[in-house]
Image (cartoon, grey):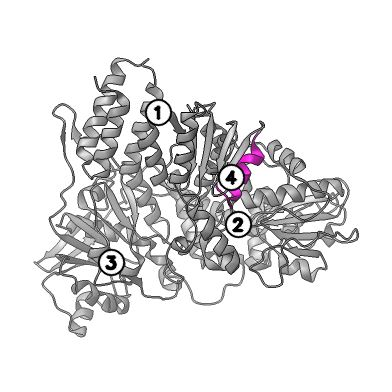
Amino acid sequence: MTTNAALIDQALKAARSGDRSRANRILLGIESQLEKDPGAKGGASTRKLIEFIRKTYAIHPSVDWADKAAGAAKEPASGGGVSLVTCCMNRTENLLQALPTWLALEEIDEIIVVDWSSAVPVSDALRGAGIEDRRIKIIRVLDEPRWILSCAFNLGFRHAKAARILKVDADIKLKPAFFEKNVLASGTFVAGDWEVADEGQEHINGFFYTFRDDLMRINGFNEYITTYGWDDDELYLRFQKFGLKRVCVDVETIYHIPHEDVQRLSGSDSAPKDAVGDLAANPLFRIRGNRYLSLVMPPWTNERQLVPFDVLLNTESYIEVRRRQGAMPHYVGSDIKADAEYYAALELVSWRIGPSVYHLPRADFYRLLESKRLDEIETADVWKLLGSQQAQPGADKVAPRLSVPNVSAPRRKIFADVQHGLGNRLRALASAAVIAEATDRELVAVWEADHHCDCLISDLFEYQGAVIGKNFVSDAVADGFTVFNYMEAEEGSEKDALLALDSTKDAYVRSAYVLNSPITGWDMENRWLRALRPVEAVRDLVSTVRQPNDVSAHVRMVGGKDYEHLPYEATENWTAEGHAAIEHWRERSHFSHFMKRIDALIAEGRAERVLLAADKSETYLEFQAAYGARVAYLTRDLYDRSAEQLRYALADALLLGTAPLLLGSTWSSFSELALRLSARNTQVEMSGRDF
């Protein structure tokens, strides 16, 4: 009888070869056996392996993939041509630049242009430019007073006839090698990603390439969203929830034509007078507002009715429609819109001055927004509105962007402006905390979400200390603080400078490293770190993974010249020497080195249970193929620096430290963090040095 472990290996091989139908049949067969014997030994770990394979290869066991009775797979058609769908309202100058690049691609069978009540009809603009092609079909929508992306594109999607759809904004050019470099495979969708786009090309995030059937199953764009922002990310999340794997478009094959954001927001181009105006002109405010709105409204599924249109004229190349009179089928009340904007405004202001803004009643918060420009708002303004000046001694002397101390009497402070990734930030913060306690100073964490670590400290820990969400190093210098900058790639920095504190001044330390002071030390820093309580979401993740294990392995492979397109691996983050060191140690942290050491430990009888944490899906697959149920891990499909991913990362760090032996990656602050958080006497071996 074939064992489940052997069947899992067969499923992995089938999935890797592209035969996902066979892989799905094998996995369904394993599940069927597990249902018959729910108490079977190793059943829980086998189910986790099945879940991991499905997530990695986008194999979902629905009727779209397999008929369980007959065992026959059913995949989206790979042929059937390509429909390009675009829309515009009064931005035909961009369309006229982009359209010839689309027409140059023979793979595109039709180009559907939804003309959303442009003042000059698109058909007239194309005729005036001498652009004619049988593949172009124009759908003109009459009498629309404002731009609604979701409704416009959904109308175009409904008219698309080909098996594959390219959703392309009117300001996106396609390069000749597009289809050669972007292959649409079953179970995937290709999309732009602002995080990996070149500077100025972030708006490619709204581009995607998908099978029409997949797009129709999720019902296109969410029509509860009728203003700029979040429409594309919300659609991508539903794609992924449906089981599709997101593949990043080759950024060299598309190009966004630059233009001002005022064109997107359809707002005034006059200078804002206060923070209300600043927020209204900020695309991020619109994006975050629609994110909140989409969370509040009912889920957007294919049970939701799309906006209906009456067809007034229909020819082979031109259709004229008008939105059907009456109430929208998916109404969003003004109170809900106002609430979404309120929470988005709170969020953006908190990023500047910290979470104290959440203490304000709503009326006072809007009073604050109307009193100043956004970049003029300070934490002291919040406490004035709260009437806390008398309760906080010396509050009238609070420097810009400083949190109110969590003490009854004023003390000198150490502002720890922590930098780079999670491990870097926590070790810098821990050393600052030890120094602050020893010198009777208040610790204020300056924790700014960025591309290295796109989260708040409150996303990870139930942290009770003072926190500021925006760095203010220039203000600290101007206000006479004692300032130390350990970030060697920045002008004026001095890494490892002795932290000589002046008892008459506050100190501001900007660092991704342990601070150089005789006051702090490894054991004291680690005690402080271990006292931090992770949030419930992180604790829940930890509880899902098998424990205890004999060996844990942290395999860090992302880094060096092949990854410098990622903002958190870019050359400006470190000196040339630092980048050379990263390149050197990442090569020595390849998973093959770890597997060789683990094989030796298995032979010695010391690695019956192995825990793995890695930064590439490839590593998990190789370990699974080699060790089967012997290896445990936290199942994931995220490998970015988002708040959700960083919760997984913190859970991984906690899990790594539960084994008596840790195999770590040299030159990785994350391996160091795992060792720091370990509550046991964990031994460590480092890649390139010990194995």
Q: Amino acid at mark 1?
A: Ala
- 2 vs 1, front mark: 1
Which residue matches tag 2? 420
Residue 658 percent across, percent down from the top left = 59, 31
Residue name at image x 53 percent, y 58 percent? 584
Residue at the far right: name it: 504
Which residue matches tag 1? 629
| Gap in angstroms between the C-alphas marked 1 and 3 | 50 Å
Q: Is residue 312 left or right of residue 354?
A: left
- 1 vs 3, front mark: 1
Q: Secondary structure at mark 1?
A: helix
Q: Are marks 2 and 3 in contact (CB under 8 Å)?
A: no
Q: Secondary structure at mark 2?
A: loop
Q: Amino acid at mark 2?
A: His
N-terminal of the pair, mark 2 or mark 3, is 3
Q: Are marks 4 and 1 in contact (CB under 8 Å)?
A: no
Q: Is residue 341 visible?
A: no
Q: Secondary structure at mark 4?
A: helix
| Gap in angstroms between the C-alphas marked 4 and 3 | 48 Å
Which residue matches tag 4? 671
| Gap in angstroms between the C-alphas marked 2 and 3 | 40 Å
Res. 414 image quadrant: bottom right
Residue name at image x 24 percent, y 51 percent? 185
Which of the two residues, 681 or 360, is positioned nearer the viewer here? 681
N-terminal of the pair, mark 4 or mark 3, is 3
Which residue matches tag 3? 87
N-terminal of the pair, mark 2 or mark 1, is 2
Residue 29 percent across, percent down from the top left = 24, 26
Q: Which residues are magenta?
A: 665-678
Which of the two residues, 215 or 341, is positioned nearer the viewer here? 215
Q: Is residue 48 left or right of residue 354?
A: left
Residue name at image x 25 percent, y 28 percent? 28
